[in-house]
Image (spheres, rainbow, N blue to C red):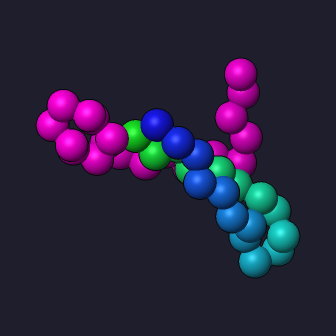
Amino acid sequence: MDFMSDRLFGGRPFRILTMVDCHTREALPLTPRADFRA
């Protein structure tokens, strides 16, 4: 599980939560959001 981050053309930041199942090595769906709350 990790976060990737980038900025949109207008300068607004966004992050993508990426997850990989360690047992099957399957990449689970990516979840993009402008903010992730704790």
Camera-side residue: 14 or 26?
26
In the image, residue 21 sits, relative to residue 32, either above or below, namely above
The chief SS type of the magenta part is: loop
In the image as oriented, which residue stretches furthest toward the front?
22
Q: Residue at x 71, y 22 (%)?
A: 38
Q: What are the residue bounds of the magenta stretch? A: 20-38
Tally of numbered tags? 0
Q: How far across and down, in percent of the image, does residue 2 sit? A: 53, 42
Q: In this view, does 12 lie to the left or right of 32?
A: right
Q: In this view, does 37 lie to the left or right of 4?
A: right
Q: How far across and down, in percent of the image, does residue 21 sit? A: 27, 35
Q: Which residue is drawn at 18% across and 31% down?
A: 23
In the image as oriented, which residue stretches furthest toward the top?
38
Q: Residue at x 65, y 51 (%)?
A: 15
Camera-side residue: 22 or 36?
22
Q: In this view, does 29 lie to the left or right of 4?
A: left
In the image, residue 35 sits, relative to residue 37, either above or below, namely below
Q: Residue at x 74, y 67 (%)?
A: 7
In the image as oriented, which residue stretches furthest toward the right?
11
In the image as oriented, which residue stretches furthest toward the bottom?
9
Q: How far across and down, in percent of the image, does residue 10 sit? A: 82, 74
Is residue 11 inside the magenta stretch? no
Is residue 32 inside the magenta stretch? yes
Camera-side residue: 22 or 13?
22
In the image, residue 11 sits, relative to residue 4, either above or below, namely below
